[in-house]
Structures are given as C-alpha cells and as structure tokens.
Amino acid sequence: MAKMFEVIFDTETKKFFDEIDGYDASKLGVSIASVYSRTLDGDFKVIDGKMQSFWEKDFNEMFKLFERADRIIGFNSIGFDVPALSPYFPGHWSKLKHFDILDSIKKIEGKRVSLDSLAKATLGSRKNDSGENAVKYWKAGDTESLAKLRKYCEMDVEITTKIYDHALQNGFLKYIDFWNETHEVKLDFSYPKIDTTTIQNSLF
C-alpha cells in the first residue's frame, strides 16, 4: 500500500448546549481545534507527524490539512465535531473521508462509550480535564485559561490517536461500563482494499 496521510482531530466549543436553541452543534461556535497530522508507510508505521492547534482565525489553514487526508479520525466527530465546524467550511466538508471511532463502536455495541472509559480500560490512562472546563476556559479568555484550553484539546487528540492506533493494530478496544465491568469490543479499522482488477478493466 502507498503512503497514507491521516488527520486526527478534536474541537472545543464556545457554548454549552443549554445556551442555544435545540441540540444543534453548528450553533455552539468552535473556540479551538487541535490536529495531529501524520504520514504512514505501507505497514502503517508513522514516518512523520505534527500536532497543531488552530484558533478560529486560522481554520482555513487547518481545512487544507483535512482536504489532503486519506482519513480524518475523530471520536464522536460525525455526531459533534463535523457539524460544529460546518459553519466555517465549504459544503463539501461533510463529504470528506471522516472516520468516527465512536460510530464504529456504536454499530457493534449498540450504545455510546466515553473516550475516558476507553482510555482507562485500554490504555490504563485517563483524561485530566473536562469538556465542561474547556468552555469555561474560553469564556474566561485570559492567557492562562486559553493555554489550559489548548492543552486539553491536544490531550484529547493524543488519547484519540492512541485509541485509534490500538484498534488498528490489535483489532479491539476495551471499555468500562456503568457497573464498572470491563468489556472488549472487536473492531476492524483497516483501510478498504482497492480492487485492482476493476481499475484495470476500466482502462480498456
């Protein structure tokens, strides 16, 4: 397989849902988005990678990374981050190659699982802050609070990357349910195989 360019991302918003009308993420406003972009070789080993965070004024630069990506990876991204960012990007934004980890899990387990639960059971680590605080950091607006906001968003991207890589390489993730029981869910995060015979036939 040729080299792949992946983008793992997370966003934080300016408002809580109870501050807007209806459950519409596009009305929340995005304060910051953090992106880990990387190139993988044919064996899915990382050749190079870079973590970047973008404030609202730099979203157009960030979108160039998304447009290049062979896969755009997030956690609850199709349900939340994609619609939250939709006011900032052109209409084809939602048609890019999005891959939502939570969506894959829900299709098998039939329920939502938190990123923190997956991190604790699969990686033995936990998030050290909350999305609720992220909104408060933005509203505070001082230099220290904005630095905490950036750190939190980048931490979410780091955890999402580790979770994704674990499933890609090992074919499963673990999570802890409401009753504190650990479950394992088998997942196939491999890229779809390209049918070279179809491509060859289309040339003639």
Image: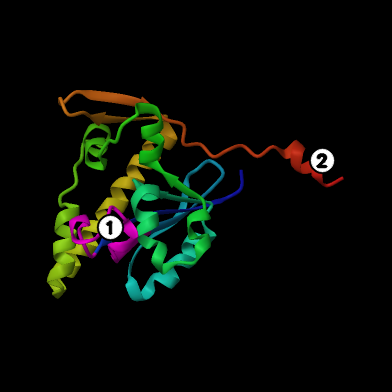
Q: Position of residue 112 (x, y in %)?
A: 29, 36
Q: Nearer the viewer, residue 103 or 125?
A: 103
User: 149 above or below 106?
Assistant: below
- Residue 23 falls within the magenta-colored stretch: yes
Q: Earlier in the sequence, mark 1 or mark 2?
A: 1
Q: Quadrant of residue 82?
A: bottom left
Taking the magenta stretch, the answer to whether it contains residue 155 is: no
* Kind of element beneath mark 1: helix
Q: Nearer the viewer, residue 130 or 84?
A: 84
Q: Is residue 137 left or right of residue 43?
A: left
* Residue 79: percent from left, percent from top: 36, 48
Q: Amino acid at mark 1?
A: Glu
Q: Secondary structure at mark 2?
A: helix
Quarter of the image that includes the N terminus: top right
Q: In the rendered structure, which amino acid carries the disc numbered 2?
A: Asn
Q: Can you identify the residue that label 1 sits on? A: 154
Q: Position of residue 61 (x, y in %)?
A: 44, 71
Q: Given this view, does label 1 or label 2 mark the residue nearer the observer?
A: 2
Image point 43% across, 34% down: which residue?
Answer: 169
- Quadrant of the image containing the C terminus: top right
Q: Which residues are magenta?
A: 14-35
User: Which residue is under mark 2?
Assistant: 201
Using a 10 Å C-alpha cutoff, classify the residue at mark 1 as few (fewer than 14 neighbours), some (14 to 19) or many (20 or more).
many
Identify which residue is drawn at 30% across, 63% down.
27
Residue 80 point in image, percent of width and height: 34, 52
Which of the two residues, 61 or 110, is positioned nearer the viewer here? 110
